[in-house]
Image: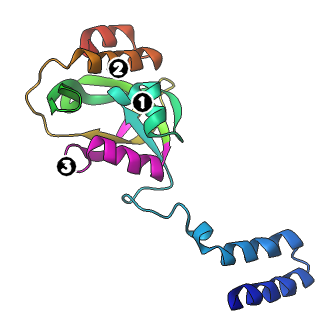
Amino acid sequence: MKIFAFNVLRTERIASRGIGFILAWLLVFVSWFPCCAAAGKEDPGDLSDIVYYFAYGSNMDAVQMERRCPGSTFLGRASLEGYGFVYDGMSVTRKGPVANIVKSPEDVVWGALFILSRRDIASLDRYEGYPTAYDRGILKVRDDSGHIYEAVVYMRSYRNSGMPHEDYRDIVVQGAIDRGLPDCYIHSVLN
């Protein structure tokens, strides 16, 4: 209660100096509720508050992305040069190999570019199994207008490739269709 009384007195002094009633009460609110001042301070890495994210697998699917990252904003399709798309490894949850990218100088990976918050990245870290199943890196991707973004990308070391479970592949393909990826890429690479 002493803190509140002190802040009210400090607020009255500020208001009497002409800074304004709203600013004064804002000061009281922030100092009285320290949890509000600290909101959003969780740090899942050295990322800024807003980050770009490049999805190339099942996270292109609108329903899945909304569930995992409800605060995300889809910017448009984008491409990543010097990497190739593969279904590899073994996911128990997805019942087979899952999406991954591997360095490949001649190839291009198409995907969806999003704006995410730190909270969204922390959520994706859990879903992607970072840092045990997937690594998280920053790579340069290009949108259709040629603008280059430094985007978070999840990837891992190459494992044996294989055919994904049909249900998983359908999610990836539907996400690619919904996000406007090139038809030839969808049919030749994702399918």
Q: Find the distance from the CA under tag 1 to the CA under tag 2.
A: 9 Å
Among the 4 quarters of the image, the one containing residue 158? top left
The residue depicted at 45 percent of the width and 62 percent of the height is 42
Vertical arrangement, residue 113 with respect to residue 129, above or below: above
Quadrant in the picture for the N terminus: bottom right
Earlier sequence position, callout 1 versus callout 2: 1
The residue depicted at 87 percent of the width and 76 percent of the height is 19
Is residue 56 in view? no
Earlier sequence position, callout 1 versus callout 3: 1
Earlier sequence position, callout 2 versus callout 3: 3
The residue depicted at 81 percent of the width and 71 percent of the height is 23
**Secondary structure at numbered mark 3:** loop
Residue identifier under label 1: 64
Is residue 13 in view? yes
Residue segment shown in magenta: 116-140
Residue identifier under label 2: 171
Residue identifier under label 3: 132
The amino acid type of the residue labelled 2 equals Ile
Vertical arrangement, residue 145 with respect to residue 45, above or below: above
Vertical arrangement, residue 44 with respect to residue 33, above or below: above
Quadrant in the picture for the C terminus: top left
The amino acid type of the residue labelled 3 equals Thr
Q: In this view, does 97 lie to the left or right of 190?
A: left
The residue depicted at 22 percent of the width and 28 percent of the height is 98
Q: Is residue 131 magenta?
A: yes
